[in-house]
């Protein structure tokens, strides 16, 4: 949920891509984050961002490099906050998490250079050090970064739950059957599980309800 994906003036918006569906999931994601933090869950942010010299973008003819350069990755732009930024480059406005979901003290930030959060990153080792097995997944985009990360998580024996109202996908948006729907279907059937923000939040409130009923 970086500015380059979900904010006006970011990479996708500059490319003329409708980002309204990404902005729509900000509020439910914020509620999930608040509940997770209150419950003591570890929050990990995956940030797509390349080095200044684009040395980690891939070889000259690699799909990762070719496709990203179509979006002018590395170009210098004027960010909405008035500062200079570079598209999808680390430590710039474009790769900052949108203000409504910004990281807090104790959160972990992992930079990645491919769609999967596990590819050549420290994510797997971080999760193992923390002793984590179950992952709650939010973010964008559903059929690209989200699904890629869930697939790699499944290959590594993690159990992932994707919150369907906290993920979004511009590709095929508005179609009768979209990429978003297709990805949620394959995740539910073979890669993990699918839930939603309401059920996630209720799951943490339920013990309190049960306790109150017993007290009455």
Image (spheres, helix red, strand yellow):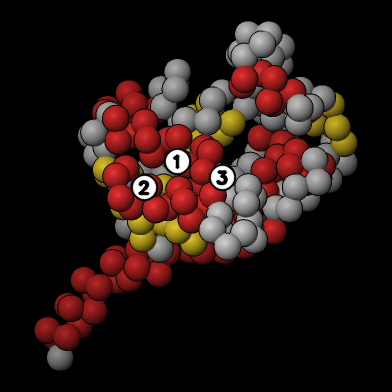
Tell me if residue 172 comes above or below residue 148 in the rendering: below
| Left or right of residue 78, residue 201 in this image | left
Question: Height in image: 3 above or below 113?
Answer: below
Total numbered labels placed on residues in the image: 3
Helix, strand or loop at label 3? It is: loop
Pointer 2 local density, CA inside 10 Å: few below 14, some 14–19, many at least 20: many
What kind of element bears circle 2? helix
Disc 2 versus disc 1: distance between alpha carbons? 7 Å
Q: Earlier in the sequence, mark 1 or mark 3?
A: 3
- The residue pinned by badge 3 equals 141
| Lateral position of residue 112 relative to residue 173, left or right | left
Name the residue at 17% across, 85% down: 213
The residue indicated by pointer 1 is 147
Pointer 2 and pointer 1: residues touching (CB < 8 Å)? yes
On-image quarter of the C terminus: bottom left
Residue 173 screen position, x and y as percent: 63, 56
The image quarter containing residue 85 is: top right
- Image location (x, y in percent) of residue 24: 62, 62
Which label number is shown at residue 189? none
Q: Which residue: 68% across, 8% down?
A: 60
Q: Earlier in the sequence, mark 2 or mark 3?
A: 3
Instruction: Quickly name the residue at label 2.
Output: 187
Q: Quadrant of residue 149?
A: top left
Separation of residues labelled 1 and 3 (CA atoms): 8 Å
Q: Which badge, 2 or 1, is on the more N-terminal residue?
A: 1
Quadrant of residue 73 within the rendered picture:
top right
Q: Are marks 2 and 3 in contact (CB under 8 Å)?
A: no
Q: As rendered, which of 215 and 19 lies closer to the eye?
A: 19
Q: Callout 3: 10 Å neighbours few (<14), some, many (20+)?
A: many
């Amino acid at each position: 949920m970086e500015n380059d994906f979900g904010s006006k003036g970011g990479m996708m918006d500059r490319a003329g891509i409708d980002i309204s569906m990404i902005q729509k999931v900000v509020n439910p994601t914020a509620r999930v984050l608040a509940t997770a933090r209150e419950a003591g869950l570890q929050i990990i942010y995956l940030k797509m961002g390349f080095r200044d010299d684009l040395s980690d973008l891939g070889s000259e003819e690699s799909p990762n490099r070719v496709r990203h350069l179509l979006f002018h990755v590395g170009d210098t732009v004027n960010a909405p906050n008035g500062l200079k930024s570079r598209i999808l480059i680390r430590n710039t406005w474009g790769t900052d998490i949108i203000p409504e979901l910004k990281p807090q003290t104790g959160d972990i930030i992992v930079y990645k250079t491919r769609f999967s959060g596990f590819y050549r990153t420290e994510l797997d080792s971080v999760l193992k050090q923390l002793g984590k097995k179950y992952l709650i997944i939010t973010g964008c985009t559903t059929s690209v970064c989200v699904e890629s990360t869930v697939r790699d998580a499944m290959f590594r024996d993690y159990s992932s739950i994707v919150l369907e109202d906290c993920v979004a996908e511009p590709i095929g948006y508005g179609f009768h059957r979209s990429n978003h729907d297709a990805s949620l279907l394959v995740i539910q059937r073979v890669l993990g599980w699918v839930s939603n923000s309401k059920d996630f939040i209720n799951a943490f409130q339920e013990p309190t309800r049960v306790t109150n009923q017993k007290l009455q």
